[in-house]
Image: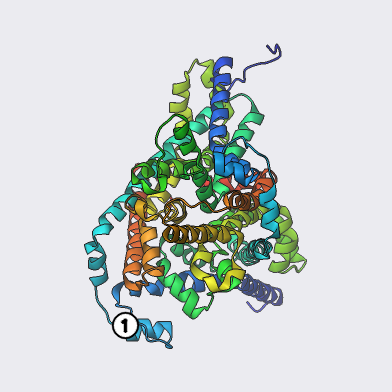
Amino acid sequence: MDKKPKNSLTKSSRKEGRQLSLMTVPVVVWYALFCYLPLFGIFFAFKDFTPVPGESLLKNLFVNSPWVGFRNFSYIFRNPQIRSIIFNTLLYNIIFLVAGIVIPVTLAILLSEIHQKMFKGFVQMTLVLPYFISWVIVGYCVYGFLSTDTGVYNSLLDHFGADKVQWYQSPQYWRVILIVLGIWKSCGYTMVIYMCSITAIDRTLYESASLDGASFWQRVRFITLPHLKTTISTLFILGIGSILTSDFGLFYQVPMDSNALQEVTQTLDVYVYKSLMQNANFSYSSAASFLQSIVGCILLIISNVIVSKMDKESALI
Amino acid sequence: MKSHYVKPQDSSFNRTTNIIMIIVFLIIIILAFMPVLLVIMASVSSEQSLIEYGYRFVPKEFSLDSFKYLFKSGSTLPRAVLNSVIITVSGTVLGLLFMCPCAYALSRKEFKHKKALMVYLLIPMLFSGGLVSTYMVNTQILHLKNTYLALILPSMCSTWYLMILRNYFRTSVPDSLIEAGKMEGVSPIQSLSFIVIPICKPVVMTVAVFQIFAYWNSWYPALIYIDSNHRELYPLQYVLVNIERTIKAMTRDAANLSGMNNVTLPSTAMRMALVVVTILPIMVLFPFFQRFLKTGMAIGAVKE
């Protein structure tokens, strides 16, 4: 045991272990400050936050604010708007979830069958670009189409002798507009992910299928889709996990925070933001975001269990 | 008719279907690009023609005045560009400096706390404190309000990137290479910087590119953490958000004062020029970066 070489070896490996641990310190500290410290804020949801100026946040939260149990939650559920807010969040997310699988998969399958390699690359590159444009910019692009006085659509309507539409005051159009934009922005990106999975499929499978006279649908049904199963379920589980989380930019910035559109554009994230920044209502806001977090977490775990029951390999965790 | 053309064996499209599908995809591309095209065209139109004819895909009257005016009108725009560059560069570089060593440790078999650290990193993916507590912690405990750090620090690291880096480090660096280095007395930090990083340049670039785009496009942190008394900290994207607010307020005031409903402010082309200035770097860099983006997306598609 006390042989010298072995001793020095363990010594050096202990030193190495220490160095490896040191290398993780920045990330560990970052996670402690920016992910774990805010977790204490869950208590906001169960407290009536009444800060005393000049005292520290933790003292204000834990000492100065009384426990109110689930009062904040019952309050937000009594809010007449909350029904439509939750309905909007769920509606848009379910549509995005379904369309976000069907459309990109279809596009990817069709694109992968095209003969010209260069063209495939070109399409992928151009369709993925919207993903890397911020919602602020998208908001302006949309404004170019919908502006009452200078927008393209109103010019067209004018041209054909129809009345102009006050787009930013007419909620009836915005469900469609928001859905189209949501799909437009993310569809190309997801398509590229599926394309990557499709190109990873062994091409000889398709060649032998062609030789055996398989039709297009048969090839999709028996070769492509089974190979995409894992990717589809991964993205599906992630989507379910964020079913109460919406893209703040799409629902707040693109409609330009127009009050007239609120009934169709307000989602939970917009509600959380507004009750925090505009109404300074810490307790209700955090109750709402606690709901988002906990429901998302539970749904993610449930859907993961279901998917892994159906097919072990497709599960996320 | 190209006589040398042979249909690839693995495609089920015949020549006609192939051509039809190419046309379909071209139409999709054009549709997808129309919004951006409209903005670009509007930015090079003269103010007068925009007011008269509205935004058009073919400008009635070509003019670069909007850009000239934009760069002449005080220090707002240059400062915003500078802010965006500072935030993007420092966020990306710091993020990599934080994440690469950690990913390296996670990729090594001999690192004992691997399991525990993984759990530590995965929990925030499942559960987060939410906007309110994040905001309160960042402003009242970390005192980030109205600083550059508020725009840089909160989005610097992500479990997703850490996993991408770790997987790549683990699979593409031969273990024997690192072991050999160790025999020579190379420390982990040295083997990361002189063996692993040079081999894994593509994946480091991938994370860098994703971060560059994310930081360049970010405006939400500015909305939350920078108040209107600190306009000098506004990044480009947030200047855009705010111009909209300002114009809205001005329009409302003007409408109230004059009793008119539609007041057109002489900024129609300028706004769009600002949009073009903001997306230009993305459009220019995109062709060079897309190789790395695709690597990232391909890795993202495959779970570990």
**Picture residue at 53% right of the left edge, 65% below the top:** B222
Is residue A218 depicted above or below B250 in this figure? above
Residue lying furthest right = B184
Structural crowding at the residue carrying mark 1, measured as other residues with C-alpha within 10 Å and reported as few (<14), some (14–19) or many (≥20): some
In the image: residue A162, left or right of residue A12? left
The image shows residue B61 at horizontal and vertical percentages of 65, 39
In this rendered view, identify the residue nearer to me: A99 or B264.
Answer: B264
Colour theme: rainbow
The image shows residue B176 at horizontal and vertical percentages of 70, 56
In the image: residue A90, left or right of residue B53? left
In this rendered view, identify the residue nearer to me: A225 or A9.
Answer: A225
Q: Amino acid at mark 1?
A: Ser
Q: Is residue B167 visible?
A: yes
In this rendered view, identify the residue nearer to me: A151 or A224.
Answer: A151
The image shows residue B125 at horizontal and vertical percentages of 45, 60
Secondary structure type for disc 1 = loop
* Residue designated by label 1: A65
